[in-house]
């Protein structure tokens, strides 16, 4: 691809963005704060936004929207109607006991059916950490399913309430010029 008139070569970049109402999930969680206090168990109707930057293929696409949306949907479906538990928190513990999961944080003790709980490899269930987990998992699944995809950057946002989002960004190598 050649540069646009008046612009130096290599300054062009392409991306796709996905903002669909159906890319949402409802989950329960509680945050643990630096002072050790924690929120009460509650839920949110989260919404997910995705942006992919990459090189164009021979057909002029970063990646067809029809190929990305089902992968994002698959991820949000895995989180939907689940209690999200931070599996890497230094104080919170969890243990599977038969068909139940017991979660303990300080004096609190919760027991829930295994199928209702999803323990994630994060240290807190903040919107930022959820965005990071979803973003890394989306990147892994996209590269696995579409090996010719040449991702340069990936951004994932998790909206907890309207206008309030955790954002995660990944860039292959911010020092590389475009087109590399």
Image (tube, rainbow, N blue to C red):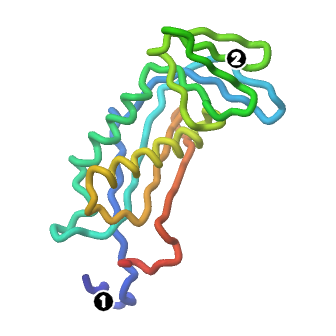
Left or right of 125, for residue 70: left
The quadrant where residue 64 appears: bottom left
Other-residue count near label 1 (Cα within 10 Å), few / some / many at <14 / 14–19 / ≥20: few
Left or right of 130, for residue 4: left
Q: Position of residue 167 (x, y in %)?
A: 54, 48
Instruction: Give the numbered dot on residue 104.
Output: 2
Q: Secondary structure at mark 2?
A: strand
Can you say whether 106 is above or below 34 in the image? above
Q: Nearer the viewer, residue 1 or 137?
A: 137
Q: Nearer the viewer, residue 93 or 137?
A: 93
Pointers 2 and 1 in contact (CB under 8 A)? no
Q: Residue at x 59, y 23 (%)?
A: 29
Q: Nearer the viewer, residue 135 or 111?
A: 111
Q: Residue at x 26, y 58 (%)?
A: 63
Q: Position of residue 32 (x, y in %)?
A: 72, 29
Q: Residue at x 40, y 46 (%)?
A: 138
Left or right of 120, for residue 149: left
Q: CA distance from mark 2 to mark 1?
A: 62 Å
The quadrant where residue 85 appears: top right
Q: Secondary structure at mark 1?
A: loop
Residue designated by label 1: 5
Can you say whether 136 is above or below 73 in the image? below
């Amino acid at each position: 691809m050649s540069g646009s008139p008046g612009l130096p070569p290599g300054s062009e970049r392409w991306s796709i963005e996905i903002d669909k109402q159906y890319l949402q999930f409802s989950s329960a969680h509680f945050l643990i704060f630096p002072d050790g206090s924690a929120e009460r168990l509650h839920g949110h109707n989260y919404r997910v936004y995705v942006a992919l930057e990459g090189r164009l293929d021979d057909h002029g696409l970063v990646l067809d929207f029809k190929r990305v949306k089902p992968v994002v949907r698959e991820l949000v479906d895995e989180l939907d109607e689940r209690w999200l538990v931070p599996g890497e928190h230094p104080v919170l513990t969890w243990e599977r006991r038969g068909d139940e999961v017991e979660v303990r944080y300080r004096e609190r003790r919760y027991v829930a059916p295994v199928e209702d709980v999803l323990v994630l490899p994060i240290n807190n269930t903040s919107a930022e950490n959820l965005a990071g987990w979803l973003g890394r998992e989306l990147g892994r699944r996209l590269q696995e399913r579409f090996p010719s995809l040449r991702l340069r950057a990936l951004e994932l946002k998790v909206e907890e309430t309207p206008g309030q989002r955790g954002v995660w960004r990944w860039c292959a190598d911010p020092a590389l010029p475009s087109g590399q």
